[in-house]
Amino acid sequence: MKYIDNLPSMDLMRSEKMMFAQLIIPVESAHRAISYLGELGLLQFRDLNDDKSPFQRTFVNQVKRCAEMSRKLRFFKDQIHKAGLMPSPHPVSQPDIELEELEIRLAEHEHELIEMNGNSEKLQQTYNELLEFKMVLQKAGDFLVPGESHSEETELDENVYTNNDYSDTVSLLEQEMQPGPSNQSGVKFISGIICKSKVLRFERMLFRATRGNMLFNQAPAGDRILDRASNEMVQKTVFVVFFSGEQARKKILKICEAFGANCYPIPEDTTKRRQITREVLSRLSELETTLDAGLHHRDAALTSIGFQLTKWMNMVRREKAIYDTLNMLNFDVTKKCLVGEGWCPVFAKTKIQEALQRATFDSNSQMGIIFHVMDSVEPPPTYFRTNHFTNAYQEIVDAYGVAKYQEANPAVYTIVTFPFLFAVMFGDWGHGICLLLGALILIAREKRLGSQKLGSFMEMLFGGRYVLLMMSLFSIYCGLIYNEFFSVPFHIFGTSAYKCRDATCSDARSVGLVKYRDTYPFGVDPSWRGSRSELPFLNSLKMKMSILFGVAQMNLGIVLSYFNARYFSSSLDIKYQFVPQMIFLNSLFGFQGRAYGILGTSDIYNDEEPDSARHPHESHNEEFNFSEVFVHQMIHSIEFVLGAVSNTASYLRLWALSLAHSELSTVFYEKVLLLAWGYDNFIIRLVGLAVFSFATAFILLMMETLSAFLHALRLHWVEFQNKFYSGDGYKFRPFSFASLTDDDD
Amino acid sequence: MYGFEALTFNIHGGYLEAIVRGYRSGLLTAADYNNLCQCETLDDIKMHLSATEYGSYLQNEPSPLHTTTIVEKCTLKLVDEYKHMLAQATEPLSTFLEYITYGHMIDNVVLIVTGTLHERDVQELLEKCHPLGMFDSIATLAVAQNMRELYRLVLVDTPLAPYFSECITSEDLDDMNIEIMRNTLYKAYLEDFYRFCKTLGGATAEIMSDLLAFEADRRAVNITINSIGTELTRDDRRKLYSNFGLLYPYGHEELAVCEDIDQVRAAMEKYPPYQSIFSKLSYGESQMLDKAFYEEEVKRLCLAFEQQFHYGVFFAYMRLREQEIRNLMWISECVAQNQKSRVHDSVVFIF
């Protein structure tokens, strides 16, 4: 026992020792102190103002200002994105600016941008109108010039145009629409342009409104035009409606307005039309240059913002986080200090004190920040210091439940047992090498992939890259033992110990092989493939192996419960839980005949002593309830007894999955690849190869990996962890700038 | 197959029912309302809402907020959710969902027609329309001069067309007959919706007929109260009541002859479910009646969520959200106009 206590402590075995600390911070240094703590990221603040709504808290105005600033920044980002520029990810190093200054600058930039947008929008609108007018002139003109008879045209009365003064087209566009009368018969027309999607309904409406007394002509406009309402480029259609009567004109104009159709008057006279077209074209080109200049100006402004944007966003995000944290603090009675409480790991104490001292010094405060340790009723949070490699394994365990404070952490063993159990089911060194290559690619690109946003699937793969690495290494190892390379056995470790009875080898399947030399040195003998001894041997090997692994792992679990009990110094748990469990489990497999007797005793042991204080840290403030503990212990012992059998049976999945994997790859190899190779036809071989590689990649490498992964996961979560792991803790979430992400706002 | 919806409902409706129940859990709670009622400025309201599901809709609004902006953005959220559900729905759920919007369509038609009558700008009117009740040619309503034209030009293309058969006249439009048109349309709509729900059968029919009957009865009471002292004859009034509901037919006979609010009350108190509503009011009072009805409606709508495998939840959710938006509008208005003492007058807590 002494020996165990003197062992050096494992980092990951127990979560970090935590302490509950109180901070008393003078108001003048509060902001700086919190910001230093945020950089350190080792203190989890407790919300002392839980009962207050967000806008009743002290620093609500600052939070609002930060929200307003981040709104502006989002606006800039949006504008930059719309302009097709990229905000530069690596900000140019510029002198740090104060938040107040930033606020002013942001307001200036926003004002400037909005003004520029307003100007260019006006210009754009005029430009659009002219463009539409041009199209109407071009297309609608064709309707007015009937192909065969020009007689009508000659009858046209020039005088009717006198009210249409085309000297200034823009002012004309703003005038009330003027329908141009067509000829003396009283037929007038209105021309304009409308979204292509609305044409049908528009025509139907016109037909109904005029009771069919109209003629509707349409032609698609050539280019796409910006639609004012939706701000998208849309196809439009030019139309000309011929009608008669004043009533109809009013109605048609109203309908045009309702459908968002823009009406443009055009003269019937060809020469006049040409003249206007020329004017419109010249104005268009003028406007185009103005627009381009405006756009250029705006892009320049946006680019200059873009250089700073990422930095500003980070800054605002940090400020907001600081004020949100400050809002969790309380004022003390004198109103001169802020009081905060929170959890931090014991090892971080000096670092935190250092940061606080620095804050006091940097803000020239007269008073130091008081940091002292307090007692807390709440259980402390769980914090494991993980690295790149161990993180994924810790995540696997945490997905089941976060460890109780300081209880034995299964992740330590999971690092080896998880990939190993996976490999038992996935033993094929060919497939293992494929996985290894994938894992190595992910690891080699770690830096690049880590900094960019990945899709959910890739992110999962990337997060588990070290799990994948270990899984592939172990499956190469297990594959060598099973002697399978894409299900093909190889003579790697010397020659086989067996040979056929005769030259034809015809009775290998029925009678068997003859041993003629020493046993094959490592793994399964390659000659057994397809022989009589293959399946009986492999089945027996894998089945026994699974049970042994299972019992070993479950024993490990029970041993861990012993360590837990020792750690929390509850001798009752050792005597009446660990010992009977150990005896029961091992006797069940050691001496099956005596299992019944022990089963009785272990039950009695468990039931007799229900008052084992299983939670020494909490027990003193929890009321002891005999019946509850009794029922709990009884359930626990029944569960264990039943579980011992069913969990062991559950480990048989190792055998089943491993068999399935090897059979499946054999089928793909023999029935697809070899079959295709039997033909002396290039195409059939190619098809066979393609089918084989697709089946290998998708079924064996993806589906089988997933299924073996899930089964290994289950074995750890259920069969292993239920022996000792309570997993009802909560994670340590320190206030840290590093954990602030884009999604926060 | 009444009682056997559980077998087949989830094939088509399961996903959307889960979605709508998820949406429902995003409704503001009494705690939220308490916090909202304590707000001092509209910015406070925005800040509080930013912690709710409305957050992403309001976060990009620049700071001097207006009540209309808040209401507009909240409505936008409802519309987005509705469109999402409609896009996912299959028959007959999609038809059911469309039925929910017809009420807004009627309101929009009336709004535009009344507006053009008073020579308002069409674009301005369009902005005031409820986005759920929009249809393609709604702006063209301004062209119409009388009911017949209204029908022939525009409404014949909309789902409202069959409801119009009752009120096609060649009379010119005026305030009075527009109001009658609204109620006639609404009557036809409710009856049609009721019939439709009956054909769906099962729990949907059961729950929806309850909810629609309540709606019909509430309209009947409102019509009665609003028409007291106008030139509407008893027979005309009688014609505007929907032909189903708890009050049909005998309650309608009584309501049709009522001359003042106390007579309405006497007629209504014969019906136990409505007795509790009227018992909250003092005699001669009708201002608080709306709120009392809303509270009763919210209670009934919440109950619709207690049962599974029916379409009533969609109707209930839309109605509850609309009530929530009304609440937000009222709170924002009170805050904006410094009338915080009146905040509780019209807010109906949902949970």
Image (cartoon, helix red, strand yellow):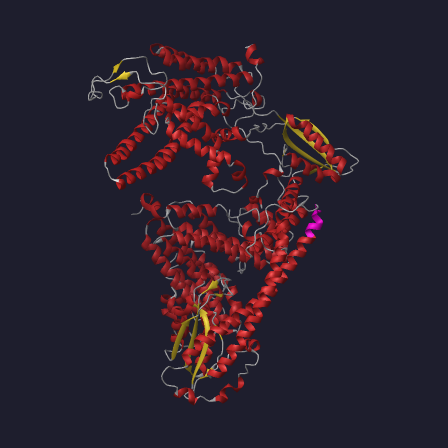
Q: Is residue A476 left or right of residue A340?
A: left
Vertical position of residue A324 compared to residue A221: above or below: above
Query: In this picture, is B257 found above or below A734?
Result: below
Q: Is residue A554 visible?
A: yes
Q: How many marks?
A: 0
Quadrant of the rendering where the N terminus of chain A is positioned: top right
Q: Residue at x 52, y 17 (%)?
A: A563
Percent of width and height locating residue B171: 42, 77
Question: Can residue B44 be seen by looking at this rendering?
Answer: no
Q: Please name whichever residue, A609 or A444, is drawn nearer the observer in this view of the structure.
A: A444
The image position of residue A436, as x and y in percent, is 43, 31
Tell whether position A109 is magenta.
no
Question: Does A264 sit above or below residue B6?
Answer: below
Residue located 42% across and 67% down the image: A196
What residue is shown at x 57% (from left), y 19% (from top)? A9
Q: Is residue A697 left or right of residue B80?
A: left
Q: Nearer the viewer, residue A479 or A341?
A: A479
- Determine whether, in the image, residue A22 is placed left or right of residue B304: right
Between B61 and A615, the residue placed more toward the observer is B61
Up/down of A337 relative to A514, above or below: below
Label the magenta part by its dominant secondary structure: helix
Q: Quadrant of residue A326?
A: top right
Place of residue B271 in the rendered image (x, y in percent of width and height, measured from the top left): 42, 54
Magenta segment:
A96-103
Q: Residue A87: image x %, image y %?
A: 59, 50
**Which image quadrant for residue A45?**
top right
Task: Tell which of A325 and A98 is nearer to you.
Answer: A98
Is residue A100 shown in magenta?
Answer: yes
